[in-house]
Image: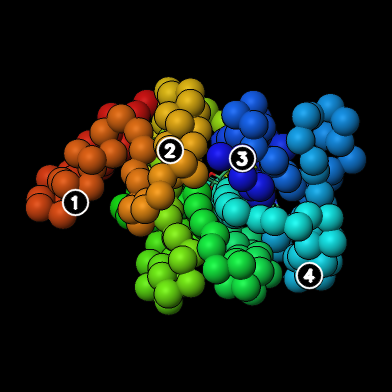
């Protein structure tokens, strides 16, 4: 069945592939970017301007969206970015901006859509969280915090929206090759005590990006959730995801030791 689907951050990475695949499958896709003029006419689906870190952009986006469409079935909250750096060395301002976009921006955009979904008594919200919303790793504390916050928020919201036939799910990818590493804001440190660890962790993070798999499994999972009548809440994706999660739950010290061993082994 043809659905109308909004994909935030459809200019790059997962969002671009998800939007393209949904369009190719016959759905009516609306993508967003902070710079839609770069993509309008070059990609086969409609692009609207949206910056989820900017309240006025979110508000005017909502008005424009509903003046242009008469149906919306699925919201895919994909837009986001990554701040890397050791927690103590990362400024609170950088950390705040990370949560402002990844958490608050996603919540505010969802709030623009919810009245419409309630009115039509159906809808589906699929948010791209991260495995880092379920586990922690060094060098990504604020990113991990933003994704943990999304987990808690949407887990609660799912209960509240059940009565309106609005489904809520979160997809939690491991590391996959997109432009997220190139687009990351990298906080560089100055605290002497961290010098050796900082170098190791930077090399570890780079190696994780270099060795990451292609993004297709995430696209496949999102499409599956789009088509499911009664989707689950949580969809971890990627090689080793279930081992990580099980280890964390039943053998935390082993999980932690394995991560630190990998970091320490990085040259
Ligand atoms: N790649 C991974 O390994 C991985 C793993 C787990 C989760 N994720 C999550 O997957 C989602 C997509 O990331 P990606 O890996 O595909 O990265 P990407 O290639 O860098 O794409 C990020 C997308 O988000 C949009 N965006 C960034 N900041 C925005 C803002 N303030 N307002 C509106 N749009 C914004 C960008 O659009 P414009 O620049 O055109 O505005 C772009 O389309 C993110 O939520 C990310 O946290 C990625």
Closer to viewer: mark 4 or mark 3: 3
Ranked by sequence position, the earlier of labels 2 and 3 is 3
User: Across the whole image, how many numbered discs are drawn on residues?
Assistant: 4
Element at label 4: helix
x 60%, y 29%: residue = 25
Ranked by sequence position, the earlier of labels 1 and 3 is 3
The residues bearing labels 4 and 1 have C-alpha atoms spaced at a distance of: 40 Å
Q: Are marks 1 and 2 in contact (CB under 8 Å)?
A: no
The residues bearing labels 1 and 3 have C-alpha atoms spaced at a distance of: 40 Å
Ligand 1, by image quadrant, is top right
Task: List the residue tagged with mark 2.
Answer: 224
The residues bearing labels 4 and 2 have C-alpha atoms spaced at a distance of: 30 Å
Q: Quadrant of the C terminus?
A: top left
Q: Any atom of ligand 1 within 8 Å of the CB at mark 4?
A: no
Element at label 3: loop
Drawn side of residue 108 relative to residue 163, left or right: right
Question: Label 2 crowding class (10 Å Cα cut-off): few <14, some 14-19, many 20+?
Answer: few
Can residue 50 be seen here?
A: yes
Task: List the residue tagged with mark 4.
Answer: 59
Task: List the residue tagged with mark 3.
Answer: 2
Task: List the residue tagged with mark 1.
Answer: 248
Question: Label 4 crowding class (10 Å Cα cut-off): few <14, some 14-19, many 20+?
Answer: some
Closer to viewer: mark 1 or mark 2: 2
The residues bearing labels 4 and 3 have C-alpha atoms spaced at a distance of: 27 Å
x 62%, y 73%: residue = 119
On the image, the x and y values in percent for residue 238 come to: 35, 33
Q: Are marks 1 and 3 in contact (CB under 8 Å)?
A: no
Question: Label 3 crowding class (10 Å Cα cut-off): few <14, some 14-19, many 20+?
Answer: few
Q: Nearer the viewer, residue 182 or 37?
A: 37
Q: Nearer the viewer, residue 86 or 23?
A: 23
Ranked by sequence position, the earlier of labels 4 and 1 is 4
Ranked by sequence position, the earlier of labels 1 and 2 is 2
């Amino acid at each position: 069945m043809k659905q109308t689907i909004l994909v935030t951050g459809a200019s790059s990475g997962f969002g671009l592939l998800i939007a393209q695949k949904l369009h190719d499958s016959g759905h009516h896709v609306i993508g967003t970017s902070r710079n839609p003029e770069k993509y309008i006419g070059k990609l086969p689906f409609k692009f609207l301007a949206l910056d989820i870190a900017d309240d006025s952009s979110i508000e005017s986006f909502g008005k424009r969206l509903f003046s242009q469409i008469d149906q919306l079935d699925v919201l895919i909250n994909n837009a986001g970015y990554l701040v890397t750096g050791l927690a103590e060395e990362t400024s609170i301002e950088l950390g705040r901006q990370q949560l402002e976009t990844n958490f608050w921006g996603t919540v505010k955009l969802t709030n623009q859509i919810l009245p419409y979904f309630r009115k039509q008594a159906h809808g589906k919200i699929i948010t791209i969280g991260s495995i880092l919303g379920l586990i922690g790793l060094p060098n990504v504390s604020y990113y991990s915090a933003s994704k943990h916050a999304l987990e808690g928020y949407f887990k609660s919201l799912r209960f509240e929206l059940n009565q309106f036939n609005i489904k809520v799910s979160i997809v939690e990818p491991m590391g996959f090759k997109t432009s997220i590493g190139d687009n990351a804001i990298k906080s560089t440190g100055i605290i002497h005590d961290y010098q050796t660890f900082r170098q190791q962790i930077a090399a570890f993070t780079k190696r994780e990006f270099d060795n990451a798999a292609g993004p297709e499994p995430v696209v496949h999972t999102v499409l599956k959730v789009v088509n499911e009548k009664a989707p689950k809440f949580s969809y971890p994706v990627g090689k080793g995801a279930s081992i990580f999660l099980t280890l964390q739950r039943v053998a935390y010290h082993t999980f932690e030791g394995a991560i630190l061993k990998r970091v320490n082994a990085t040259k």
